[in-house]
Image (cartoon, rainbow, N blue to C red):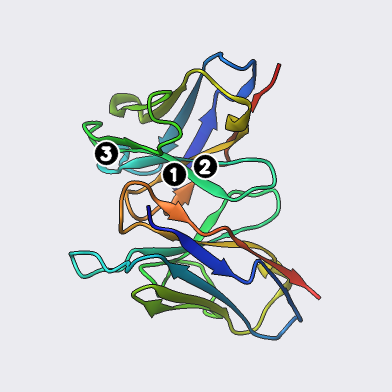
Amino acid sequence: DVVMTQSPPSLPVTLGQPASISCRSSQSLVDSDGNTYLNWFHQRPGQSPRRLIYKVSNRDSGVPDRFSGSGSGTDFTLKISRVEAEDVGIYYCMQATHWPPGTFGQGTKVEIK
Amino acid sequence: QVQLVESGGGVVQPGRSLRLSCAGSGFSFSDYSMHWVRQAPGQGLEWVAIISYDGDNKYYADSMEGRFTISRDNSKNALFLQMNSLRPEDTAVYYCVRGRRDLDYWGQGTQVTVSS
Protein backbone atom coordinates (compact mmCIF):
# COMPACT_ATOMS: atom_id res chain seq x y z
CA ASP A 1 0.00 0.00 0.00
CA VAL A 2 1.05 3.57 -0.62
CA VAL A 3 2.12 5.31 2.57
CA MET A 4 1.38 9.03 2.88
CA THR A 5 3.58 10.98 5.27
CA GLN A 6 2.63 14.49 6.35
CA SER A 7 4.72 17.04 8.15
CA PRO A 8 4.66 18.72 10.50
CA PRO A 9 2.12 16.93 12.74
CA SER A 10 1.31 20.22 14.43
CA LEU A 11 1.62 23.73 13.05
CA PRO A 12 1.12 26.77 15.28
CA VAL A 13 0.68 29.85 13.12
CA THR A 14 0.14 33.56 13.62
CA LEU A 15 -2.96 35.12 12.09
CA GLY A 16 -2.12 36.71 8.77
CA GLN A 17 1.08 34.71 8.34
CA PRO A 18 1.66 31.95 5.78
CA ALA A 19 1.56 28.23 6.52
CA SER A 20 2.83 25.24 4.61
CA ILE A 21 2.11 21.52 4.98
CA SER A 22 4.13 18.79 3.29
CA CYS A 23 2.82 15.45 2.08
CA ARG A 24 5.08 12.74 0.71
CA SER A 25 4.01 9.43 -0.83
CA SER A 26 5.97 6.18 -0.80
CA GLN A 27 5.60 5.89 -4.57
CA SER A 28 4.76 8.14 -7.45
CA LEU A 29 1.13 9.24 -7.63
CA VAL A 30 1.15 9.76 -11.40
CA ASP A 31 -1.55 7.55 -12.84
CA SER A 32 -1.40 5.75 -16.17
CA ASP A 33 -3.92 8.30 -17.47
CA GLY A 34 -1.42 11.08 -16.78
CA ASN A 35 -3.30 12.54 -13.84
CA THR A 36 -2.05 12.74 -10.26
CA TYR A 37 -4.83 11.97 -7.81
CA LEU A 38 -3.75 13.81 -4.71
CA ASN A 39 -6.48 15.46 -2.61
CA TRP A 40 -6.33 17.76 0.39
CA PHE A 41 -9.05 17.86 3.05
CA HIS A 42 -9.74 20.16 5.98
CA GLN A 43 -11.56 19.04 9.08
CA ARG A 44 -12.70 21.63 11.60
CA PRO A 45 -13.30 20.47 15.18
CA GLY A 46 -16.56 18.54 15.41
CA GLN A 47 -17.18 18.62 11.66
CA SER A 48 -16.86 16.29 8.72
CA PRO A 49 -13.86 16.63 6.43
CA ARG A 50 -14.24 18.98 3.50
CA ARG A 51 -12.25 18.68 0.31
CA LEU A 52 -10.14 21.74 -0.51
CA ILE A 53 -7.92 20.64 -3.37
CA TYR A 54 -8.12 17.84 -5.93
CA LYS A 55 -5.58 16.53 -8.43
CA VAL A 56 -2.74 18.36 -6.66
CA SER A 57 -3.64 21.94 -7.38
CA ASN A 58 -7.32 22.40 -8.26
CA ARG A 59 -9.29 24.35 -5.66
CA ASP A 60 -12.83 23.28 -4.93
CA SER A 61 -15.68 25.71 -5.40
CA GLY A 62 -15.92 28.14 -2.51
CA VAL A 63 -12.37 27.52 -1.29
CA PRO A 64 -10.59 30.83 -0.72
CA ASP A 65 -7.71 31.57 -3.06
CA ARG A 66 -5.33 31.86 -0.10
CA PHE A 67 -5.21 28.04 -0.31
CA SER A 68 -2.98 26.53 -2.96
CA GLY A 69 -1.69 23.06 -3.73
CA SER A 70 1.44 22.12 -5.60
CA GLY A 71 3.83 19.28 -6.20
CA SER A 72 4.44 16.29 -8.38
CA GLY A 73 5.44 12.65 -8.26
CA THR A 74 5.87 11.91 -4.57
CA ASP A 75 6.21 15.36 -3.06
CA PHE A 76 3.26 17.70 -2.45
CA THR A 77 2.53 20.88 -0.53
CA LEU A 78 -0.53 22.72 0.71
CA LYS A 79 0.03 26.41 1.34
CA ILE A 80 -2.09 29.00 3.08
CA SER A 81 -0.91 32.45 2.08
CA ARG A 82 -2.39 34.28 5.09
CA VAL A 83 -3.91 32.20 7.85
CA GLU A 84 -7.32 33.21 9.14
CA ALA A 85 -9.06 32.05 12.32
CA GLU A 86 -11.42 29.79 10.34
CA ASP A 87 -8.46 27.82 8.97
CA VAL A 88 -7.80 26.01 12.24
CA GLY A 89 -8.33 22.28 12.27
CA ILE A 90 -6.68 19.22 10.81
CA TYR A 91 -5.51 18.95 7.22
CA TYR A 92 -5.18 15.60 5.49
CA CYS A 93 -3.67 14.64 2.19
CA MET A 94 -4.99 11.56 0.45
CA GLN A 95 -3.88 9.60 -2.60
CA ALA A 96 -6.45 8.13 -4.96
CA THR A 97 -4.11 6.92 -7.69
CA HIS A 98 -3.32 3.45 -6.38
CA TRP A 99 -6.65 1.81 -5.52
CA PRO A 100 -7.39 0.00 -3.34
CA PRO A 101 -6.86 1.12 -0.70
CA GLY A 102 -7.12 4.84 -0.66
CA THR A 103 -4.62 6.13 1.85
CA PHE A 104 -4.61 9.27 3.95
CA GLY A 105 -1.78 11.09 5.60
CA GLN A 106 -1.84 11.12 9.38
CA GLY A 107 -2.95 14.75 9.46
CA THR A 108 -1.50 18.15 10.35
CA LYS A 109 -3.15 20.12 13.11
CA VAL A 110 -3.16 23.86 12.44
CA GLU A 111 -3.73 26.11 15.42
CA ILE A 112 -3.39 29.81 16.11
CA LYS A 113 -0.49 30.93 18.28
CA GLN B 1 -27.42 20.68 -3.17
CA VAL B 2 -25.60 17.43 -2.59
CA GLN B 3 -26.52 15.79 0.70
CA LEU B 4 -25.36 12.56 2.28
CA VAL B 5 -27.05 11.50 5.49
CA GLU B 6 -25.79 8.51 7.43
CA SER B 7 -27.79 6.55 9.93
CA GLY B 8 -27.76 3.25 11.78
CA GLY B 9 -24.92 3.83 14.22
CA GLY B 10 -25.13 2.98 17.89
CA VAL B 11 -23.64 0.99 20.74
CA VAL B 12 -23.13 -2.71 20.06
CA GLN B 13 -21.37 -5.54 21.88
CA PRO B 14 -18.23 -7.14 20.47
CA GLY B 15 -19.02 -9.89 18.01
CA ARG B 16 -22.40 -8.45 17.07
CA SER B 17 -23.50 -6.85 13.81
CA LEU B 18 -24.67 -3.45 12.67
CA ARG B 19 -25.91 -2.07 9.37
CA LEU B 20 -25.20 1.51 8.40
CA SER B 21 -27.16 3.42 5.77
CA CYS B 22 -26.47 6.54 3.78
CA ALA B 23 -29.15 8.46 1.90
CA GLY B 24 -27.96 10.53 -1.02
CA SER B 25 -29.83 13.45 -2.54
CA GLY B 26 -29.22 16.45 -4.78
CA PHE B 27 -27.28 14.48 -7.38
CA SER B 28 -27.62 11.49 -9.67
CA PHE B 29 -26.72 8.83 -7.11
CA SER B 30 -26.46 6.00 -9.64
CA ASP B 31 -23.71 7.83 -11.54
CA TYR B 32 -21.21 7.80 -8.68
CA SER B 33 -18.98 5.36 -6.89
CA MET B 34 -19.36 5.67 -3.14
CA HIS B 35 -17.05 5.13 -0.18
CA TRP B 36 -17.18 4.52 3.51
CA VAL B 37 -14.41 6.21 5.49
CA ARG B 38 -14.08 6.01 9.26
CA GLN B 39 -12.40 7.98 12.03
CA ALA B 40 -11.64 6.47 15.41
CA PRO B 41 -11.80 8.78 18.44
CA GLY B 42 -8.98 11.32 18.29
CA GLN B 43 -7.48 9.60 15.26
CA GLY B 44 -7.09 10.27 11.55
CA LEU B 45 -9.13 9.16 8.59
CA GLU B 46 -9.19 5.52 7.49
CA TRP B 47 -10.64 4.34 4.22
CA VAL B 48 -13.02 1.40 4.65
CA ALA B 49 -14.58 0.39 1.34
CA ILE B 50 -15.69 1.53 -2.10
CA ILE B 51 -18.48 0.38 -4.39
CA SER B 52 -18.77 1.20 -8.07
CA TYR B 53 -21.67 3.22 -9.43
CA ASP B 54 -23.51 0.07 -10.52
CA GLY B 55 -22.61 -2.04 -7.52
CA ASP B 56 -20.63 -4.53 -9.57
CA ASN B 57 -17.22 -3.78 -8.08
CA LYS B 58 -16.38 -3.58 -4.40
CA TYR B 59 -13.09 -3.19 -2.58
CA TYR B 60 -12.25 -3.23 1.10
CA ALA B 61 -9.45 -2.29 3.42
CA ASP B 62 -7.60 -5.42 4.50
CA SER B 63 -8.68 -5.18 8.13
CA MET B 64 -12.36 -5.18 7.12
CA GLU B 65 -12.29 -7.74 4.33
CA GLY B 66 -14.59 -10.63 5.16
CA ARG B 67 -16.33 -8.81 8.02
CA PHE B 68 -17.79 -5.76 6.26
CA THR B 69 -19.97 -5.70 3.15
CA ILE B 70 -20.69 -2.58 1.15
CA SER B 71 -23.81 -2.48 -1.01
CA ARG B 72 -26.17 -0.01 -2.62
CA ASP B 73 -29.73 0.36 -3.85
CA ASN B 74 -29.75 2.89 -6.66
CA SER B 75 -33.55 2.79 -6.85
CA LYS B 76 -33.58 4.29 -3.35
CA ASN B 77 -30.41 6.40 -3.60
CA ALA B 78 -29.03 4.44 -0.69
CA LEU B 79 -25.62 3.12 0.35
CA PHE B 80 -25.13 0.49 3.03
CA LEU B 81 -22.38 -1.00 5.15
CA GLN B 82 -23.09 -4.33 6.82
CA MET B 83 -20.62 -4.80 9.66
CA ASN B 84 -20.29 -8.24 11.24
CA SER B 85 -18.09 -9.62 14.01
CA LEU B 86 -17.52 -6.14 15.33
CA ARG B 87 -14.47 -5.44 17.47
CA PRO B 88 -13.74 -2.63 19.93
CA GLU B 89 -11.24 -1.23 17.42
CA ASP B 90 -14.11 -0.69 14.96
CA THR B 91 -15.36 2.10 17.24
CA ALA B 92 -15.40 5.20 15.04
CA VAL B 93 -17.46 7.76 13.22
CA TYR B 94 -18.35 6.31 9.82
CA TYR B 95 -18.66 8.69 6.89
CA CYS B 96 -20.37 8.14 3.57
CA VAL B 97 -18.38 9.84 0.79
CA ARG B 98 -19.12 10.47 -2.88
CA GLY B 99 -16.87 9.86 -5.85
CA ARG B 100 -14.35 7.24 -6.94
CA ARG B 101 -11.25 9.37 -6.86
CA ASP B 102 -12.93 12.63 -5.99
CA LEU B 103 -14.25 12.13 -2.44
CA ASP B 104 -15.84 15.51 -2.98
CA TYR B 105 -18.83 15.33 -0.62
CA TRP B 106 -18.95 13.82 2.87
CA GLY B 107 -21.87 13.08 5.13
CA GLN B 108 -22.00 14.21 8.75
CA GLY B 109 -21.10 10.72 9.95
CA THR B 110 -22.69 8.17 12.25
CA GLN B 111 -21.07 7.01 15.49
CA VAL B 112 -20.44 3.32 16.03
CA THR B 113 -19.32 2.22 19.48
CA VAL B 114 -18.33 -1.39 20.09
CA SER B 115 -18.26 -2.10 23.79
CA SER B 116 -19.43 -4.69 26.27
The reply to whether callout 2 and callout 1 are in contact (CB within 8 Å) is yes
- Nearer mark to the viewer, of 3 and 2: 3
Q: Position of residue B80 (x, y in %)?
A: 41, 26
- The Cα atoms of the two marked residues, 2 and 1, are separated by 6 Å
Give the x, y percent position of residue A85. Answer: 73, 71
Q: Which residue is mark 2?
A: B107
Q: Nearer the viewer, residue B1 or B21?
A: B21
Q: Is residue B11 above or below residue A77?
A: above
Tell which circle, 2 or 1, labels the residue nearer the N-terminal end: 1
Residue occupying the point 40% across, 79% down: A71
Type of residue at label 2?
Gly
For the point 46% across and 31% down, the residue is: B22
- Report x, y in % for residue A9: 65, 66
Q: Secondary structure at mark 3?
A: loop
Q: Is residue B74 left or right of residue A32?
A: right
Chain bearing mark 1:
B
Mark 3 / mark 1, whichever is N-terminal: 3
Which residue is pictured at 35% across the width and 68% down the height?
A: A55
How far, Cα to Cα, is label 3 from label 1?
12 Å
Quadrant of residue A34 in the image?
Answer: bottom left
Q: Are marks 2 and 1 on the same chain?
A: yes
Q: Is residue B65 left or right of residue B106?
A: left
Chain hosting mark 2: B
Three-letter amino acid code at disc 3? Answer: Ser
Viewer-proximal residue among B34 and A71 = A71
For label 3, the residue is B52
In the foreground, A62 or B62: B62
Amino acid at pointer 1? Val
Sequence order check: which comes first, mark 3 or mark 2?
Answer: 3
Q: Is residue B102 above or below residue A74?
A: above
The circle on residue B97 is: 1
> How far apart, in angstroms, are the residues tagged by discs 3 and 2?
18 Å
